[in-house]
Amino acid sequence: MIGEPYNDVVREHFAHPGHAGDVPDGAIGYFEDQGLRIRLSAEVAAGVLNRLRFRAWGCPHVLAACEEFCRRYEGRPATDLEEFETARIMEDLAVPVEKTGRILVLEDTVRSLGQAIQDLTDTPRE
């Protein structure tokens, strides 16, 4: 449809965000910029992202990008977060170039989550 701002993937993720919420006692990544807030939480065991959840305050593209991130990375090694880039998500969600900065907030939040996981891993246990 010409002029339609959201593709089918964005509409599906926005309508059915299966990863919305929090992981209790999970590692937390948070970033706020451009009036957007994204919070990611993860349960990590044996170096694997067993559960990922998000909370996001932004446009439908941002919420859909968070859902897409969780779907792609849940079940993968936590070290894979270091390789996260937004380009593929932007392509799959047909995010307009003028919203690039908004989607890059997700990339910053993923980096924050990766650091939080690293900090938990480096903390000695009693």
Image (spheres, grey):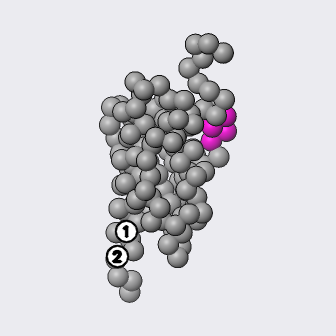
Residue 87 among magenta residues: no
Q: Quadrant of residue 9?
A: top right
- Label 2 crowd (10 A; few <14 / some 14-19 / many >=20): few
Q: Up-down: is 97 above or below 67?
A: above
- Whether residue 97 is visible: yes
Q: Residue furthest top?
A: 2
- The spot of residue 51 in percent (x, y) is 58, 60
The span shown in magenta is 12-17
Q: Are marks 2 and 1 in contact (CB under 8 Å)?
A: yes
- Taking the spot 51% from the left edge, 42% from the top edge, the residue there is 88
Q: Name the amino acid type tagged 1.
A: Gln
- The spot of residue 66 in percent (x, y) is 52, 43
Prevalent SS, magenta region: helix
- Taking the spot 34% from the left edge, 41% from the top edge, the residue there is 32
Residue 15 as seen in the image, left or right of residue 32: right
* Viewer-closest of 74 and 126: 74
- Label 1 crowd (10 A; few <14 / some 14-19 / many >=20): some
What residue is shown with label 2?
A: 122
Q: Quadrant of residue 93?
A: top right
Q: Give me the C-alpha separation between circle 2 and circle 1.
A: 6 Å
Q: Name the amino acid type tagged 2.
A: Asp
* Viewer-closest of 66 and 8: 8
Residue 14 among magenta residues: yes
- The spot of residue 29 in percent (x, y) is 40, 54
Q: Secondary structure at mark 2?
A: helix
Q: Quadrant of the C terminus?
A: bottom left
- Taking the spot 60% from the left edge, 63% from the top edge, the residue there is 75
- Taking the spot 62% from the left edge, 41% from the top edge, the residue there is 17
What residue is shown with label 1?
A: 118
Q: Residue furthest bottom?
A: 126
Q: Quadrant of the N terminus?
A: top right
